[in-house]
Image (cartoon, grey):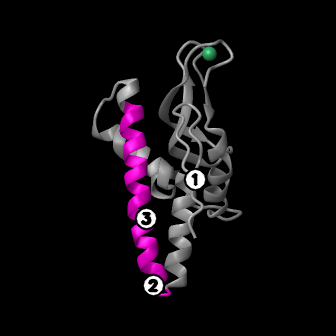
Amino acid sequence: MKCNCEQHLNLELRTVMYTRSVMIRHVPVLVCDHCLTYELIPSMRPDLKKCVDLLGPDPSNTSFSLADYHELANLIYEVMTEADYSEDGLKRKLEYEIQERINLLLDLYKMADRMHDIAWVGELRNRLSQLSVILPEMNVFQQMNEK
Ligand SMILES: [Zn+2]
């Protein structure tokens, strides 16, 4: 994915002011070094809203890390704090880690399903759906149509 100025967009974690009072840390964004602008990954926008909605109408805790609430943000955070990757290295590492995380969650999902643990199944379904967003920059697209 490219910026309007035709420069390459880089994946970074940023602190984002969601509203005047809500600040979200560790949000994966696409950054243009040339224009110094950044944008949210479009497919993450609804998830971001869901996390903010969890705060309620009059939140007392107005600053939080998305890595604590969102599977993909969590994974990107872990990978990025672990080492300084080149752009290609980061892409490969993320693709690998996303696949690994999906496999892990699917295993847990099967277990939860066997135990008829409805709440756990729901939680895992949600975490899997958060990983299934498209990262346009990286061409990562995981389709989660498993029953
Ligand atoms: Zn640009």
Q: Is residue 113 magenta?
A: yes
Residue 128's spot in the image, x, y percent?
A: 52, 60
| Residue sitting farthest toward the bottom | 116
Q: Which residues are magenta?
A: 90-116
Furthest residue in direction left, as rendered: 83
Q: Earlier in the sequence, mark 3 or mark 1?
A: 3
Reading the image, the residue beneath label 3 is 105
Say the numbered circle drawn on residue 114: 2
Quarter of the displayed picture in which ligand 1 can be seen: top right
Which element carries disc 2, helix, strand or loop?
A: helix
Residue type indicated by callout 1: Gln
* Three-letter code, disc 3: Leu
Q: Is residue 104 left or right of residue 35?
A: left
How many residues crowd around disc 3 within 10 Å: few (fewer than 14), some, or many (20 or more)?
some
At horizontal 71% and vertical 63% (from top left) the residue drawn is 57
Horizontal side, residue 86 vs residue 13: left or right: left
Depth check, mark 3 against mark 1: the one in front is 1
